[in-house]
Image (cartoon, helix red, strand yellow):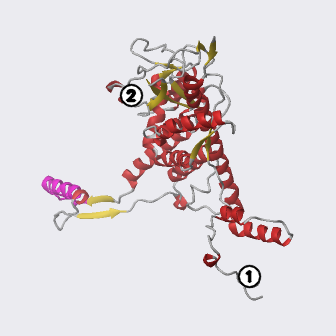
């Protein structure tokens, strides 16, 4: 009897895992056509339309360049990914039954033994920017057990959606339509910034236009600085100056630009004319670039107060609201990645080794918000005053305080509950 995999395809439950490599990355896959070179609005629309039809090759190359060329965009994407990776994670049994605990122990042993597991999780979190991420599972079967030897990242440009809007791997035999990966051979992590297809789901699709406008602003800003950033060197000569004198003056002006030295005759003159800035000392290129940065921060982090602080003012309450939005994103990213790992990594581990009808352990990131210990201590004091019994073990664990093993180790309590003389 067959069962369904993550993509809804039937497969034989008794079949072993696929052990051959599928998405081998060759030298040609490291090259890029650099679609951002000379990027214009019509070209950007063309790239997005190709992706809408399932051909995401140029869109993924563009997204790679966006992270490489824009320092602000790279920083906020890295911040969001690292917020998930900074948390501890654990494998928990489905229930407290001895069998479920034995299954969870085996799965945890395999997961924790994976080489560079944090790197593999970072590869899957690339879905935040690009809409999806894929890693190939390298299975090894020995001693009657199926184990995962490695999780290897598959570049998004080696995936296509042209056939039926489902992910397929591009191979030399199928360079356009792609092939379906075997059951339980890949982990496909989908990030939904909004409803719709995976080709349009990533936040880099949202900030694509801001990236284009910022590129225009920086290009114009560089051209402006080249023309007006340095004072104009103006040479003056007498009407009776000979051609040799004029040539010497021109050469002196050029030397002033390179090594700030030159020799001219007494009958000639060099004047430095300072370039005038914009009216009111307002730099429109800088304003546009900063506006684009703020829009990128909103799209990636959900707020701007923790990233764009130059010239920004805000109250403590506003900062708390912005930080809460960011915490919500971290929690959502963690839950989404944990669900993907449970459905596409833990499930085949359990299925191949214990049977496809066995319950799947839980994969959980230990997401904990920082608590105000001062406020919490006041709550505990009030509960104690109301006569609520509290165990020392619970209080010590909540505040991270090691309890004394003997009475001699205990520090005597101050009179008046430690509040000082009142």
Q: Position of residue 319 (x, y in %)?
A: 67, 60
Instruction: Specify whether 421 is left or right of 280.
Output: right
**Magenta-drawn segment:** 236-255
Q: Quadrant of residue 392?
A: bottom right
Q: Find disc 2 in the rendering and name its residue.
A: 33
Q: Position of residue 33 (x, y in %)?
A: 38, 28
User: Would you call the spot at circle 2 few (<14 residues within 10 Å), some (14-19), or many (20 or more)?
Assistant: few
In the rendered image of this protein, does residue 264 appear above or below residue 63?
below
Q: How many marks?
A: 2
Instruction: Specify whether 177 is left or right of 192.
Output: left
Q: Main secondary structure of the magenta part?
A: helix
Q: Is residue 237 magenta?
A: yes
Instruction: Specify whether 263 is left or right of 398.
Output: left
x 61%, y 67%: residue: 402
Q: Find disc 1 in the rendering and name its residue.
A: 419
Q: Secondary structure at mark 1?
A: loop
The tag earlier along the polypeptide, 2 or 1, is 2
């Amino acid at each position: 009897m067959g069962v369904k995999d993550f993509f809804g395809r039937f497969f034989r439950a008794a079949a072993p895992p696929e052990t051959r490599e599928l998405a081998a990355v060759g030298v040609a896959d490291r090259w890029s056509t650099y679609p951002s070179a000379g990027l214009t609005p019509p070209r950007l629309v063309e790239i997005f339309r190709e992706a809408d039809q399932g051909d995401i090759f140029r869109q993924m190359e563009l997204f790679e360049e966006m992270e490489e060329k824009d320092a602000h965009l790279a920083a906020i994407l890295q911040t969001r990914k690292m917020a998930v990776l900074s948390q501890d994670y654990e494998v928990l049994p489905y229930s407290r039954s001895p069998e479920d605990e034995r299954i969870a122990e085996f799965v945890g042993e395999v997961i924790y033994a994976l080489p560079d597991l944090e790197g593999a999780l970072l590869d899957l979190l690339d879905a935040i920017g690009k809409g999806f991420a894929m890693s190939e599972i390298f299975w090894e079967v020995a001693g009657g057990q199926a184990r995962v030897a490695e999780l290897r990242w598959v570049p998004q440009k080696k995936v296509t959606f042209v056939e039926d809007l489902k992910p397929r791997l591009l191979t030399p035999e199928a360079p356009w339509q792609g092939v379906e990966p075997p059951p339980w051979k890949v982990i496909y992590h989908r990030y939904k910034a909004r409803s719709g297809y995976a080709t349009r789901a990533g936040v880099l699709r949202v900030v694509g236009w801001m990236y284009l406008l910022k590129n225009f602003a920086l290009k114009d800003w560089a051209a402006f600085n080249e023309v007006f950033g340095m004072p104009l060197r103006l040479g003056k000569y007498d009407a009776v100056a000979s051609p040799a004198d004029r040539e010497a003056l021109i050469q002196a002006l050029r030397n002033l630009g390179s090594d700030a030295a030159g020799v001219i005759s007494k009958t000639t003159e060099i004047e430095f004319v300072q370039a005038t800035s914009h009216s009111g000392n307002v730099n429109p290129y800088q304003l546009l670039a900063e506006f684009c940065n703020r829009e990128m921060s909103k799209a990636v982090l959900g707020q701007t107060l923790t990233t764009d602080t130059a010239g920004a003012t805000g109250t403590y309450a506003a900062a708390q609201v912005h930080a809460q939005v960011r915490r919500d994103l971290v929690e959502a990213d963690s839950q989404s990645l944990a669900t993907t790992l449970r459905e596409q990594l833990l499930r085949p581990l359990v299925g191949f080794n214990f049977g496809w009808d066995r319950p799947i352990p839980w994969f959980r990131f230990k997401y904990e918000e920082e608590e105000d210990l001062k406020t919490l201590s006041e709550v505990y004091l009030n509960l104690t005053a109301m006569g609520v019994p509290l165990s020392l073990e619970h209080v010590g664990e909540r505040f991270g305080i090691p309890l004394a093993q003997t009475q001699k180790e205990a520090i005597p309590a101050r009179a008046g509950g430690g509040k000082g003389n009142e």
